[in-house]
Amino acid sequence: MKKALVCGAGGFIGHHLVRFLKKEGFWVRGVDLKYPEFSPRDEADDFVIGDLREIDTWSKILDTDFDEIYQLAADMGGAGFVFTGDNDADIMHNSALINLNCLYALAKRNFKGKVFYSSSACVYPEYRQTDPNNPGLKEEDAYPAAPDSEYGWEKLFSERMYLAFHRNYGINVRIARFHNIFGQEGTYEGGREKAPANICRQVAMVIDGGTIQLQGDGEQTRSFLYIDDCLVGVRKLMNSNYTYPINIGSDRIISINELARLIIKISNKQNIQIEHVGSKQLGVRGRNADLKLAKEVLGWYPTVSLEEGMRNLYQWVYEQLKTKGLVDKLQKTEIGFRAK
């Protein structure tokens, strides 16, 4: 039986990945500061509560030989956390330290398996994302570098660090640049949630005829990838021989206003109004994924439509709020969001 280690297994993508690997027959150890919030903690064969910023934690969890290691742990959240500027130092320090410890520990042990690193579309330069009709960001577009956030700079630095350890220590790395992964069993309130979950929560909580809020003018565009497609892409990447960063995302671009209207339609509410608050322009104006390399190298392309994925997410968020007695309330959130 193959063994896998999932770092960040308490997070959204991480706990879905644990479940996916188990179905493939892996023995899986998860590690995080916390257990998954919305799924059973015993889905992993072993779950370690540990701080990956501490090198001793890596010594503890690497007490057996793993065939595959998935490094998804990071200090992150939605745009309300990442892009305010208030958390930049912690984001850069905590995430970089996790990755430094990971690679140091693997090099010290002469690790011979494969290690996956979850990077982000946030590595792409701001100057390539000024057009709402973004034709799609190619992997080589990351340079000359100019990410629009410290989160993006840390991701780009860590990409280079994984590649440096590959060159100097022979560590077999795989790097995916995720583009807005969404789905059920993720954060949907509290300020760290991302755009789809935020809008789903607002729509579910307001009565027909009420109002939801979007930050900015809503004309900024993004592409969104459903979690099931993401996991298939990750596994195809791990089974490939490709070492360099590759986009795992969708190439269907949509404005945030259009996304909100789609979710309102899914809710079957007829007269929800959209109120725009805050700056007229927040974040990059257009972000989309070019998937040519993923199709050529991995034979991978998303299969779940945006409508199907959003329907699944909305129903799940609705059920979570229903258990709390919070659905269909005439209530406007002041959190809003800034599209990542």
Image (tube, rainbow, N blue to C red):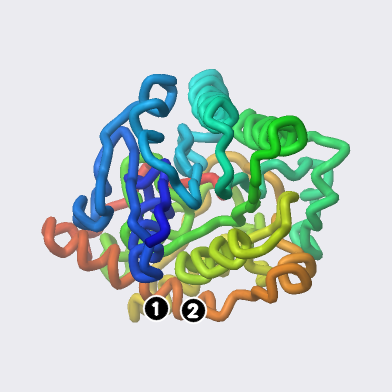
First along the sequence among labels 1 and 2: 1
- Residue drawn at x 34%, y 37% is 32
Q: Name above or below for residue 237 compared with residue 193.
A: below
Q: Which mark is residue 307?
A: 2
Q: Are marks 1 and 2 in contact (CB under 8 Å)?
A: yes
Q: Is residue 325 left or right of residue 86?
A: left
Q: Name above or below for residue 208 compared with residue 42.
A: below
Q: Is residue 328 left or right of residue 12?
A: left
Across the whole image, how many numbered discs are drawn on residues?
A: 2
- Residue drawn at x 81%, y 57% is 138
- Residue drawn at x 25%, y 66% is 318
Q: Name above or below for residue 257 compared with residue 190.
A: below
The local crowd at label 2, few if under 14, some if 14 to 19, many if 20 or more residues have their Cα within 10 Å, is few
What is the three-letter code of the residue carrying label 1?
Ile
The local crowd at label 1, few if under 14, some if 14 to 19, many if 20 or more residues have their Cα within 10 Å, is some
| SS category of the residue bearing label 2 | helix
Q: CA distance from mark 1 to mark 2?
A: 8 Å
Residue 11 point in image, percent of width and height = 37, 47
Residue 271 visible here: yes
Q: Name above or below for residue 271 compared with residue 36.
A: below
Locate the N terminus by quadrant. Answer: bottom left
Residue 243 point in image, percent of width and height = 72, 51
Q: Which mark is residue 250?
A: none
What is the three-letter code of the residue carrying label 2?
Glu
| SS category of the residue bearing label 1 | helix
Residue 225 point in image, percent of width and height = 55, 65
Residue 91 visible here: no
Residue that mark 1 sits on = 266
Q: Is residue 28 left or right of residue 143?
A: left
Residue situated in front as seen by the camera: 134 or 169 = 169
- Residue drawn at x 87%, y 37% is 144
